[in-house]
C-alpha cells in the first residue's frame, strides 16, 4: 500500500534493471539503481517498484522473470511510467523494443531511458523504429567497448571474471594464491606426473582431503585442473583444434603480459600435457550425455564407465558394489528419443503469434489514411511517396526480425539440437533447466525434476 506522502509526487514509476552475465561488471546493477533513484528525486517521481533480472540476456523475454512481472504491474496497477538506465536493458533488439514500447504507450504509460535521453509518450512508428535501431547499434558498440576493456585488463594481469580454483582476486583484481587450494593443485600434478591414474587421484583426495571444505573430486574436475595453464604464472585461454580423424590438440594463448604467482612450474605442466596429449582421443570421447542428469531409482547419482559401456550408481568416498547398472548406449538412445518427441512450447503457435503485430496494423492504417489524404489533395505527392518509402523500410525490418524469431524458436527444439548432433549443447541446456531423470523398472524414462513445463 502506498503511503499518503505519494501525494507529494507528480508521478508514480516502476524501474527495471538487468545485467546479462560476466560481460557486465558487478557494479552494474547498483549503478543503474542509483541513477534511476537520483532521476526520480530530481523530478518528484515516486518509485513504487525496482525490478531486477541478474545475468539474463535481453534477447528472449521468457527467462526474464522480473521483466514479465513488470508487464503485469504496468497492466494491472496504477503507474505512470517505466524507467530504465539504458534502453537495451529493456529490450535487446529493435523488433522487441518497438513492440514493447508501443504496448506501454498504448496503455498510456511513459517510457524513459536515462542514458539515451529517451522519453516515449506519443511517438510515430517511424520515429520509434529509428530510435530502436539506434538503441541496438549503441548496445553493440557498448558490448565491444566492454570486451576491449576486459582484454586490456587481462593484459596487465587483472582477472575480470571468476578466478580459477587455487586463486582469489585482490583489490586490484590481480590473482593471489589460496594456499590450501594450491596444495590440492600441486598434489594433482605431482600424482599424475608420477604415473597415478585419474581414478586413483580422485580416490586419494576424496578419502583424505587436504583441508576442510575441499570440493569433491571427479574426473572432469581433475582434467580441468590439469589442462589449466594459468597455474604456471600467466593467464591463458585454450583453443581445441579438431582434426579430420576425430583427434584433437589444445593450443594455449597467453592473454596476460604481467605475471602472477605460479602454483606449478612450466616444466610440471608440460610434463602432464605430454601424458594427456597421448590419450587425447579418450579424453575427447569421455563425454557422457546422461552423467549428471540421471539418478539411480534408489536416489543416488549416476556416473559412467566408458570402457565398460555402463552407467552405474556413484557413492563418493565409499568403496562398495554399485546397486544399479545400465547399458550406456541404451540409456542415451532412450533419452534422445524421448527428447526428440517433444516440441518447443511456443512452436505450434509461432505463425499465429507473429503474423500480424500491432505495429504492422498501424502501418497499414496509416498508409490507407495517407492514400485518402493524397486522393483529396490534402498532402503533396512528395509527402505521400515519402510515407510509403518509410513504411516499406519499417516493414522490411519487421519481416527480417520475425523470420529470425521464428527460426530461433524452431531451433530451440530438442529435435533440432539432436539432428545437428549438438549433444554437449543439449546437455548444457538440460542442466540449466534442472532436468533430472531415472529409468523405471520397465526401462522407460521417468522425469524427476524439470523447470520447463511440457
Image: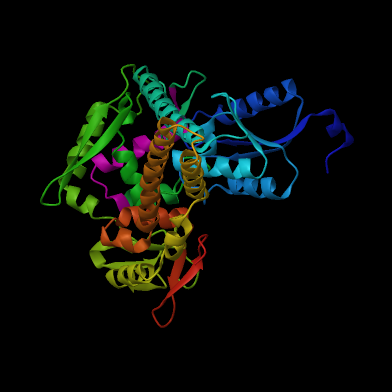
- The overriding secondary structure of the stretch rendered in magenta is helix
Q: Look at the image and tell me in which quarter the N terminus lies.
A: top right
- Tell me the magenta residue range: 175-199
Q: Which of the two residues, 268 or 224, is positioned nearer the viewer here?
A: 224
Residue at the image position 33 percent from the left and 67 percent from the top: 336
Q: Position of residue 366 (x, y in %)?
A: 50, 43
Q: Horizontally, is 168 left or right of 224 in the view?
A: right
252 up-or-down from 275: above or below? above
Magenta stretch contains residue 94:
no
Depth check, front residue: 431 or 321: 431
| Picture layout, residue 444 above or below residue 89 | below
Quadrant of residue 409 within the rendered picture = bottom left
- Residue 166 visible in rendering: no
Q: Residue furthest front?
A: 376
Choose between 191 and 170: the one closer to the eye: 170
Q: Residue at x 36, y 23 (%)?
A: 151
**Residue 187 lies in magenta, yes or no?**
yes
Can residue 113 be seen here? The reply is yes
Question: Quarter of the image holding residue 426?
Answer: bottom left
The picture places residue 63, in percent across and down from the top left corner, at 52, 50
Find residue 144 and report its horizontal and vertical position in percent: 38, 26
Closest to the observer: 388 or 175? 388
Residue 213, position as x, y percentages in the image: 52, 43
Amino acid at each position: 500500500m502506498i503511503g499518503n506522502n505519494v501525494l507529494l509526487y507528480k508521478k508514480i514509476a516502476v524501474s527495471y534493471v538487468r545485467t546479462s552475465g560476466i560481460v557486465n561488471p558487478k557494479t552494474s546493477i547498483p549503478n543503474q539503481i542509483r541513477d534511476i533513484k537520483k532521476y526520480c528525486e530530481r523530478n518528484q517521481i515516486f518509485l513504487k517498484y525496482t525490478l531486477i533480472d541478474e545475468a539474463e540476456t535481453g534477447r528472449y523475454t521468457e527467462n526474464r522473470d522480473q521483466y514479465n512481472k513488470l508487464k503485469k504491474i504496468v497492466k494491472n496497477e496504477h503507474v505512470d511510467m517505466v524507467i530504465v538506465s539504458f534502453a537495451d536493458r529493456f529490450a535487446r533488439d529493435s523488433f522487441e523494443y518497438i513492440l514493447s514500447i508501443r504496448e506501454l504507450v498504448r496503455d498510456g504509460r511513459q517510457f524513459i531511458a536515462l542514458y539515451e535521453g529517451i522519453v516515449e509518450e506519443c511517438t510515430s512508428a517511424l520515429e520509434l523504429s529509428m530510435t530502436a535501431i539506434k538503441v541496438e547499434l549503441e548496445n553493440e558498440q557498448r558490448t565491444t567497448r566492454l570486451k576491449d576493456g576486459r582484454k586490456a585488463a587481462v593484459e596487465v594481469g587483472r582477472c575480470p571474471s571468476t578466478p580459477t580454483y587455487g586463486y582469489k582476486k585482490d583489490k586490484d583484481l590481480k590473482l593471489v594464491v589460496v594456499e590450501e587450494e594450491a596444495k590440492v593443485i600441486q598434489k594433482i600434478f605431482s600424482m599424475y606426473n608420477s604415473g597415478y591414474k585419474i581414478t586413483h587421484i580422485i580416490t586419494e583426495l576424496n578419502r583424505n582431503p587436504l583441508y576442510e571444505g575441499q570440493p569433491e573430486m571427479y574426473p572432469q574436475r581433475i582434467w580441468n585442473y590439469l589442462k589449466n595453464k594459468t597455474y604456471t604464472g600467466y593467464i591463458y585461454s585454450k583453443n581445441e583444434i579438431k582434426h579430420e580423424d576425430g583427434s584433437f590438440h589444445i593450443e594455449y594463448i597467453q592473454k596476460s603480459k604481467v605475471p602472477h604467482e605460479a602454483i606449478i612450474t612450466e616444466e610440471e605442466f608440460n610434463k602432464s600435457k605430454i601424458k594427456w596429449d597421448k590419450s587425447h582421443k579418450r579424453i575427447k570421447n569421455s563425454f557422457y550425455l546422461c552423467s549428471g542428469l540421471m539418478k539411480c531409482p534408489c536416489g543416488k547419482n549416476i556416473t559412467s564407465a566408458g570402457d565398460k559401456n555402463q552407467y552405474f550408481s556413484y557413492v563418493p568416498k565409499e568403496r562398495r558394489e554399485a546397486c544399479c547398472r545400465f547399458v550406456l548406449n541404451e540409456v542415451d538412445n532412450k533419452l534422445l528419443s524421448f527428447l526428440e518427441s517433444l516440441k518447443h512450447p511456443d512452436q505450434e503457435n509461432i505463425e499465429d503469434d507473429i503474423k500480424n503485430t500491432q505495429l504492422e496494423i498501424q502501418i497499414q492504417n496509416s498508409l490507407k489514411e495517407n492514400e485518402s489524404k493524397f486522393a483529396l489533395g490534402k498532402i503533396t505527392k512528395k509527402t505521400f511517396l515519402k510515407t510509403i518509402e518509410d513504411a516499406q523500410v519499417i516493414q522490411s525490418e519487421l519481416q527480417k526480425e520475425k523470420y529470425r524469431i521464428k527460426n530461433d524458436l524452431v531451433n530451440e527444439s530438442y529435435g533440432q539440437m539432436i539432428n545437428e548432433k549438438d549433444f554437449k549443447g543439449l546437455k548444457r541446456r538440460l542442466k540449466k533447466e534442472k532436468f533430472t531423470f531415472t529409468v523405471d523398472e520397465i526401462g522407460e524414462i521417468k522425469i524427476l525434476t524439470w523447470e520447463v513445463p511440457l
